[in-house]
Image (tube, rainbow, N blue to C red):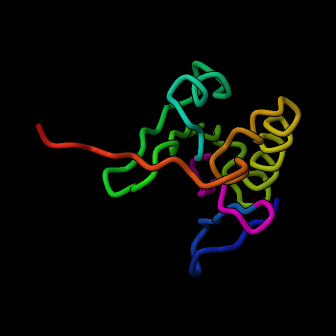
């Protein structure tokens, strides 16, 4: 996992194999790319996690995510990034990361909304 700082603040974008997988800021760690709410919930450390639905501008299905608030003692950049790395390793350990849209084989599914 690689972290790239956004601007001059304490926000970072997280990447694996050049695919964006999430972000870290001074208050939370987030991951996106799960096909369904259930997959995101399965990986989230409940009750600490907040599920993140796909954004309205998202054109592909499968962008559910979760966000976990950092406790006050982990809000310094070095600790926040370490927590993100631990969480990513845990996701890799479960194998669920292979089901994230960023790493799925073939084209990402497209969400089609028909007006009736």
Q: Is residue 98 magenta?
A: no
Q: Residue at x 61, y 67 (%)?
A: 10
Residue 25's place in the image compared with 6, above or below, is above
| Place of residue 17 in the rendered image (x, y in percent of width and height, measured from the top left) | 80, 64
Above or below for 75 versus 64: below
**Residue 27 on the magenta segment:** yes
Image location (x, y in percent) of residue 104:
70, 47
Image check: 60 left or right of 44? Answer: left
Counting every numbered tag in the picture gives 0
- Vertical placement of 109 versus 19: above or below? above
**What range is drawn magenta here?**
16-32
In percent of the image, x 46 and y 39: which residue is there? 52
Q: Check the picture and name the quadrant holding the N terminus.
A: bottom right
Classify residue 40 by image quadrant: top right
Using the image as rendered, state which of residue 50 and residue 62 is in the foreground.
62
- The image quadrant that residue 3 belongs to is bottom right
Tell me which secondary structure the magenta stretch mostly adopts: strand
Residue 88 position in % (x across, y down): 79, 44
Question: In this view of the protein, which residue sits in the foreground, 83 or 66?
Answer: 66
């Amino acid at each position: 996992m690689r972290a790239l700082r956004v601007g001059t603040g304490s926000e970072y974008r997280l990447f694996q194999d050049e695919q964006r997988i999430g972000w870290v800021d001074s208050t939370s760690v987030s991951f996106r790319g799960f096909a369904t709410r259930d997959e995101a919930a399965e990986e989230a450390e409940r009750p600490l996690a907040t599920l993140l639905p796909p954004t309205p501008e998202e054109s592909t299905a499968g962008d559910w995510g979760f966000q976990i608030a950092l406790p006050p003692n982990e809000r310094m950049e070095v600790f926040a990034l370490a927590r993100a790395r631990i969480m990513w390793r845990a996701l890799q350990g479960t194998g669920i990361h292979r089901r994230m849209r960023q790493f799925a084989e073939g084209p990402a599914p497209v969400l089609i909304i028909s007006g009736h």
